[in-house]
Image (spheres, rainbow, N blue to C red):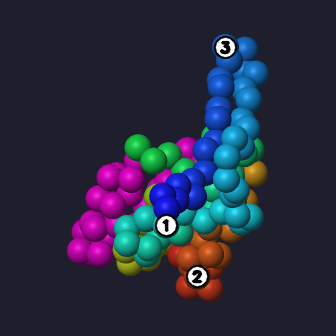
């Protein structure tokens, strides 16, 4: 008996005037939805069904890994994360051993999501992150 693997399919259509449609077509999405990166060391809270930006730019994974490696090697100890959005670079830096990170973004909602991701990673108690 052939069994189809479980998958999740989210459809998104972006229109010119800011009218976007995001719809779950198949499967389910856990709440909260946590995505891991760098062999599970970094955890990010994402919102696939909330608007056009889900909370993590996948094309920046190599940049996050590069920064984390630089922090692990001791070459970077402080990070200014401008346009921080949901603070993914902050999580990579702190998990790599950075002493402090300052996250700046115009969107308070995005920074709140970033703070939650810091909590999920156990980085709040250690300090080092400012929002």
Q: Which residue occupies 32% across, 70% down?
A: 71
Whole-number angstrom distance, CA of label 2 to CA of label 1: 14 Å
Whole-number angstrom distance, CA of label 3 to CA of label 2: 40 Å
Residue found farthest to the bottom: 125
- In percent of width and height, residue 80 lies at 47, 56
Task: Please state the extent of the stretch shown in magenta in the rendering.
Answer: 60-86
Residue 105 seen anywhere in this rendered image of the structure:
no
Establish if 28 lies above or below 34: above
- Residue underneath mark 1: 36
- Residue underneath mark 2: 122
Name the one closer to the observer, 117 or 105.
117
User: How would you rate the neighbour count of disc 1 (Cα within 10 Å): few for under 14, some for 14-19, many for 20 or more?
Assistant: few
- Residue underneath mark 3: 16
Whole-number angstrom distance, CA of label 3 to CA of label 1: 32 Å
- In percent of width and height, residue 9 lies at 61, 44
State which tag comes first along the sequence, 2 or 1. 1
């Amino acid at each position: 008996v052939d069994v189809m693997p479980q998958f999740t399919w989210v459809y998104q259509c972006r229109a010119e005037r800011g009218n976007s449609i995001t719809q779950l077509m198949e499967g389910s999405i856990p709440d909260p939805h946590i995505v891991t990166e760098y062999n599970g060391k970094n955890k990010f809270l994402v919102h696939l069904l909330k608007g056009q930006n889900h909370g993590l730019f996948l094309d920046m994974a190599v940049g996050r890994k590069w920064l984390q490696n630089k922090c692990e090697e001791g070459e970077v100890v402080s990070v200014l994360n401008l346009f921080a959005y949901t603070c993914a670079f902050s999580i990579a830096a702190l998990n790599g051993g950075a002493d402090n990170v300052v996250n700046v973004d115009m969107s308070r909602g995005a920074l709140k999501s970033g703070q939650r991701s810091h909590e999920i990673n156990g980085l709040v108690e250690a300090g080092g992150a400012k929002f």
